[in-house]
Amino acid sequence: MEDRFPAVRKGLLEFALLRIIAGARVYAADILSRLADTEFATQEGTLYPLLAKLRREDLVDHEWVESGAGPPRKYYALTEKGAVRLKELTAYWERLNSDLEDLGR
């Protein structure tokens, strides 16, 4: 996939992950699948370090769940702090969009 605006994409990837994880408890393959057909499509080599960063910052937590189809899976969920960060990012995103709209007038 062509990446014409890598800095913008990289900065928004955390926001995208928090939005996905806020929707439901998910594991990495779910996340990669949700991102696959978007501008945020990425690979495990990018996803896992970012998930580890979000976990170190206490924005997400994980739980190991046994799988009938193989090894246990690590499911991610937002923490309280993660929900607050997502709310802040959403508000910031709305302000940015508003500012960009105003600048274009």
Image (spheres, helix red, strand yellow):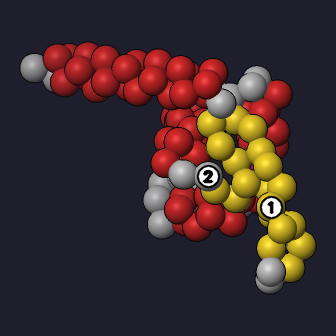
Residue 47 position within the rendered picture, expressed as x and y whole percent measured from the top left: 73, 50
The 10 Å Cα crowd at callout 1, few under 14, some 14 to 19, many 20 or more, is few
* Numbered disc 2: secondary structure: loop
Q: Residues within 10 Å of mark 2 (few under 14, many from 20)?
A: some
> Mark 1 = which residue?
65
Write down the quadrant of residue 67 in the picture. bottom right
User: In this rendering, would 1 be left or right of 77?
Assistant: left
Q: Which residue is mark 2?
A: 25
Say whether residue 5 is visible.
no
Report the amino acid beneath label 2: Arg
Residue 54 visible? The answer is: yes
Residue furthest left in the image: 105
Quadrant including the N terminus: bottom right
Quarter of the image where the C terminus is located: top left
Q: Amino acid at mark 1?
A: Val
In terms of depth relative to the viewer, which is nearer, 19 or 45?
A: 19
